[in-house]
Amino acid sequence: MHVTAMSGPGASRRRKAVLTALADVAALALCLGGALWLRFGAAIPPEHEWLYLFCWPLVFAWTLLMAHAFGLYDFRRRLSAMDHFFAACGAAPAGVLGAYFFLVLLQTYYFYDARLSRAVVVINVALVLAWFTLSRAAVLAWLAAEGCRVRVLLMGPEEDCSGLEEELRAHAPRSMEVRAPASWRAGSAAQDESVETGVARGAARIAAEGVDEVILTASALPQHALSRLLAECGRRGAGLYVYPDLGAALLASTRVRGIAGLPVVALQPAVTEGLYRYGKRGLDIALAAVLLVLTAPAWLAAMAAVKLTSPGPIFFSQERMGLGERPFRLYKFRTMVAEAEAESGPVLAQREDPRVTTAGRWLRRWRVDELPQLLNVLRGEMSMVGPRPERPVFARAYAEENPLYAQRFRVRPGLTGLAQIHGRYDTEYTHKIRYDLIYINSLSLPADLQILFSTIQIVITGKGAV
């Protein structure tokens, strides 16, 4: 039996999304009614009620649009209740406040007798946020009870797929199912024929197994093979992605320009052009200053925890390489035993590292140990967003092994970055550099803000911490 785009887990998720949207309409009406009741009691003044009743289709339509924009109907890519909670934190205020501002305009210019309570708006935001969060958790539980999981298929040469399959299976969420790879042998005399056969076999499995996401581990496919795969994924509604090699990562979001009529692609990022450089520095200074004030209690708690649980200094400093390969001293709260490398010499930290103290594990889990680097940001040695700085001994070794590693020194190192929100603490540097190259070639303030917001989610959930 073949699973098509009209049946199987994908269709089940789409049906749940439609049912959720219908339930949202009824829930939004209840939330608004509940907010009015909580503010005014059973006797709701007509002047506070009639404008909502008159404009409810537009009000609810806008809120549903915001729910869709923030991914609250996406049960294929948002696989956890926490993902939906953070989406709801954006959708609920955007939906309710956006509708409120629209009603304020109507009241100001047309309906002078109407009244709008700010307390009702605040209560409504809270109720809608609670509904979005709880309803999505219920839908995810419903899908899990039906055994509906996101099916992922790796495609590429055998040697590439084997390592990635093991990593995917080790870290995939329970709502994701990693299928056996559709692979082929590379380097044979009949290599093109082998790739053709492998792609054809993978394309057939997309339909037969109801695959949702296809990850290519090799971007250099013959044009006809890639076209066939794109067509099959399009017919079946499957997502097609490339796990980039370093060359492909270097080309991510590149700028195209013309030279004497020839279309050319710039391989070096425009890190110092336009207002981005000055806007980013201004954002760094403002955020670092505000966070230093807001996190003062966390500083005091961390200092006490470090001092009371292990002998040694409170702060830890270490030389790192920054912009233009210039060394600087990076500061952290100490999370390891004093003189942790006295006998071993420079070594990379590992997951479940025995040198980490009890207090250090908690500081790392909630990223509190990184707070002193706000001082590095204010001093201009670091940025809020960028590749994480590495020690000179390791940075030079990595750059010697792979010259593209030196691209990281074209920007200031950061407190957080693309590798930190998508990877894990123990992700190998060969994977991290892919994220770093993609970031460096996609520099923009909106991208930095998105990474900062995603970092908040990482900090709250403790994801990827040692």
Image (spheres, helix red, strand yellow):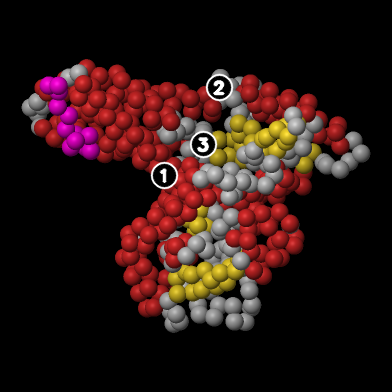
Residue at (42% x, 23% y) in the render: 18
Q: Residues within 10 Å of mark 3 (few under 14, many from 20)?
A: few
Q: Is residue 169 visible?
A: no
Residues shaded magenta? 112-123
Residue 300 place in picture, x, y as percent: 33, 70
Residue 38 place in picture, x, y as percent: 15, 35
Q: Nearer the viewer, residue 174 or 287?
A: 287
- Please report contact status of discs 1 and 3: CB closer than 8 Å, yes or no: no
Q: Residues within 10 Å of mark 1 (few under 14, many from 20)?
A: some
Name the residue tied to disc 2.
7
- Please report contact status of discs 3 and 2: CB closer than 8 Å, yes or no: no
> In the shown orientation, is residue 118 left or right of residue 445?
left
Amino acid at dot 3 = Arg
Q: Is residue 375 visible?
A: yes
Name the residue tied to disc 3.
77
Q: Nearer the viewer, residue 153 or 47?
A: 47
Residue at (19% x, 35% y) in the render: 118
Q: Is residue 187 above or below residue 363?
A: above
Q: CA distance from mark 1 to mark 2?
A: 28 Å
Name the residue tied to disc 1.
82
> In the shown orientation, is residue 50 left or right of residue 289?
left
Residue 222 place in picture, x, y as percent: 80, 31
